[in-house]
Amino acid sequence: MLQITGTAQKKAWDENILPPVEMVGDGLWSIPVPIPDNPLRYVLVYVLEAGEKLAIVDAGWDTIEAWDALKAGLEVMGAKVEDISAVLVTHIHPDHYGLAGRVREASGAWIGLHPADAAMLKGRYVDTSELLSRMEKLLERSGVPNERLPDLEMASMVIRSLVTMAEPDILFEDHSPVDLTGWDLITVWTPGHSPGHVCFFSEKRQLLLTGDHVLPRITPNVAVHSQQDSNPLGDYLQSLLKVRNIAAYEVLPAHEYRFSGLADRVDEIIAHHQRRLDEIVEAVRQRPGSTAWEITIGLHWSRPWEEIPDFMQRAANGETLAHLVVLELKDQVHKVGDSPWRYYPGPGL
């Protein structure tokens, strides 16, 4: 059963305010760093006391507001940015990776990232021409109407300004230890939300820092997109099983609040995706020949479709594609054509 351990964080979430800077364990702190114009509101940056230095897990967006919040949080601890010697990045999305380069510039800290995400950096944040071309093709194949293509194709480009591009100094490999004084962190590679997403596990402290992989209330976006076009949902479900039985008393996610009951939460998320798979199968049964975009619009979302901004509509379409890939592999649906793809019930139904 999921139990909330971050009670102050949960209270702040319910009140729609930033949670406090907290000492959440011996030599372990949590600093909320705000995310601009985003329903997630903040990323929880975890600060680990490592001898005379500090390490942080994730860093926040590269905005003045986020930078000031990180510095202010460190001041509550009696520390400063210059004390940071390591930035452990769970994945390359801007709310986790964005400030890593600026922290390194200020402190000389090393930056760590999984190789699968490191390989995508230049294509995502420097030369984006191929990224945009592939995204346009993917949206066309999804059946997005021509008048919507420009808005959806360019929906994430504003985010580029919220990242200080920084190549990693260290590459995290699955099951490898992280060299931090006083800590026994082990890297757990959990692809799905991004190809190189990682969690960090401390056996001695019985805690798992999950980034976006396992959150207490919502599920991360797991989508087919122009840098992740094979089977991201299949990867994600396998990654959930990989962490399900880890002996972690407490889960420290990058959003919302801390909790215990990892196995039960994993089971809830798997069940959520099964319900979505079932919903998509039924949609294809009811409307054979539908495009991914048409299926997406007809699914149940947390708010009316017309209230969802372009970037999130594109992410929703990517989630539908990710579920359709799984269903294709199970022969429950099959697609016909190329631009757009059209989906029909498969022989496995």
Image (tube, rainbow, N blue to C red):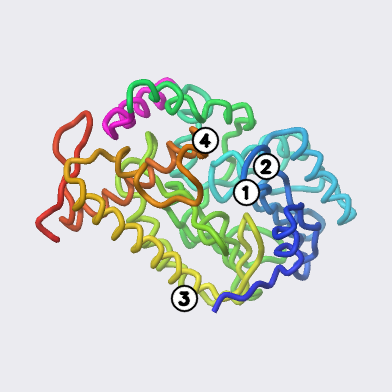
Name the residue at the bottom extreme: 1
What residue appears at the point 80 percent right and 58 percent down from the top-left corner? 20
348 shown above or below 318:
below
Of label 4 and label 2, which has the lower sequence position? 2
Spatial distance from mark 3 to mark 2, Cα to Cα?
31 Å
10 Å crowding of disc 1: few (<14), some (14-19), many (20+):
some
Report x, y in % for residue 192: 41, 52
Q: Amino acid at mark 2?
A: Ile
Of pointers 3 and 2, the one earlier in the residue sequence? 2
> What's the CA distance linking mark 4 and mark 3?
37 Å
Q: Mark 4 or 3 closer to N-term?
A: 3
**How dense is the environment of label 2, judged by Cα within 10 Å: few (below 14), some, or many (20 and up)?**
some
Q: Earlier in the sequence, mark 1 or mark 4?
A: 1
Residue pointed to by mark 1 = 40
Query: Does 146 sit above or below residue 9?
Result: above
- The residue shown at (62%, 76%) is 3
Secondary structure beneath label 3:
loop
Alpha carbon separation for disc pair 2 and 1: 7 Å
Secondary structure state at the residue bearing disc 4: loop
Mark 4, residue position: 309
Residue annotated with mark 3 = 245
Q: What's the distance in space between the residues labelled 1 and 4, CA to CA?
A: 14 Å
Q: Secondary structure at mark 2?
A: loop
Q: Which mark is residue 35?
A: 2
- Please report the residue visible at 62 percent of the width from the left and 55 percent of the height from the top: 254
Sequence order check, earlier mark of 1 and 3? 1
The segment highlighted magenta reads 129-144
- Choose mark 4 or mark 3, whichever is in front: 4
